[in-house]
Amino acid sequence: MKGTLLVLLGIFLLHAASLLFRRLKDEERSPRLASFPPPPAAREDWPTISIVVPARNEEKHLATCIGSLRSIDYPALEIVIVNDRSTDSTGAMADQFAREDGRVKVVQGQDTPEGWTGKNYAIHQGTVEAGGEYLLIVDADSVLAPDALKQAVHYTEQEEVDLLTLYPSVVCDSFWERALLPWLGVLSTFRMDRVNDPETPEAMAYGYFLFFRRASFDKVGGHKAIRDRVGEDWIIARRLKSMGLRLRMLMGTEYVTKRFGPSLAEIWQGFTKNFILIMEGNKWVAALALPMMIYYLLFTVLPWAILAAAPLVLLTAGWNSFWALAFLLASLQICMLGAVRALLKLFTGVNVSSPWLQPLGGIVVTAMGLSAIHRTLSDKGIVWKGREYKKF
């Protein structure tokens, strides 16, 4: 038993080292929009842009989102808010924004037709009303910087890009955001180099910032072409890239901010949905994911348990080589993961100031993963914004 525990701690240490190495490589393989030369200050011929914001029960976030969009420094802009049959004050808020600002247009979403997902139909209704030469689709909890659009247009034109998507700065203010989001960030990988390589099939995009040439959006069929799919952002990116169009993913932490919380319920629903989408409804994948979730639970919690228990054992029972070695391995792993978290903060700006919440984060993330596995194996599908999807 003791030997097994030491082997496991050794594996954990090597895993942490691989995470650190991967994070060190992220900077060189993940280009930043901010590193691209800015547009000329004297430019006057800016193309028209329509921003489409699908909003379903977003009263907590909509004012912040629309406030940021209205503050954007861009001369040829319209904002299309789609009130996706909200049951809270989202619709009234959207109407108020339209009364205050002539650039804001409100589309009252209709009942979702058969064969469509709710969000795809909301986006479709918004894009039908949008008249811009460029089309930006953002989630209703995204926040954009004032110079985001000028930099995005300049980059897209210079690089002849059909779809630009940005990785955002993630808000990590609430207790549950600080407990869960850094841990999910530690485990994630970016590999933007493969997404940006036209020779690879890998494609990804983030619904927080989907910036299309309108002609390219229409060429792929818009959201009508993927009407029945959940996870529309990466699916439309995959479709666009497979058609030979240019997809670019950049770090955009200086331009886009995203909030996944603040509550546990919001984070749980969002990431459980994402876990289910990763498994794509495949029960074999879900079954294989079960031991992986158990591994990650141990990887997260066990070193901290050893860190707490080993000094007590050594103080009360005297010198013990097993506990001393276990303490050393656990400490090294925790320090290495601390370095990964520090790099994550430098790379994405995420708040990683509460490393002691990592065990709790690991437990809850494991529970989210197990919930996703259960829903996949039992054909319960996805619950998102009050709607259920059995096929996606």
Image (tube, rainbow, N blue to C red):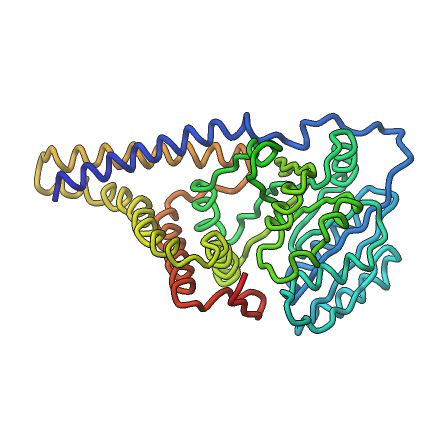
- Residue 161: x, y in percent? 72, 36
Q: Residue furthest right?
A: 44
Rendering quarter of residue 31: top right
Q: Is residue 156 left or right of residue 392?
A: right
Determine the residue positioned at 85% across, 53% down: 131
- Residue 30: x, y in percent? 57, 31
Rendering quarter of residue 76: top right
Determine the residue positioned at 70% across, 39% down: 245
- Residue 33: x, y in percent? 67, 32
- Residue 358: x, y in percent? 38, 46
Which quarter of the image is occupied by the C terminus? bottom right
Determine the residue positioned at 33% across, 54% down: 290
Q: Is residue 140 left or right of residue 215?
A: left
Which quarter of the image is occupied by the N terminus? top left
Q: Is residue 301 left or right of residue 229?
A: left
Q: Is residue 339 above or below residue 187?
A: above
Count of numbered circles on the image: 0
Q: Nearer the viewer, residue 178 or 235?
A: 235
Q: Nearer the viewer, residue 284 or 60?
A: 284
Q: Is residue 48 left or right of residue 276?
A: right
Q: Residue furthest front?
A: 243
Q: Nearer the viewer, residue 202 or 388?
A: 202
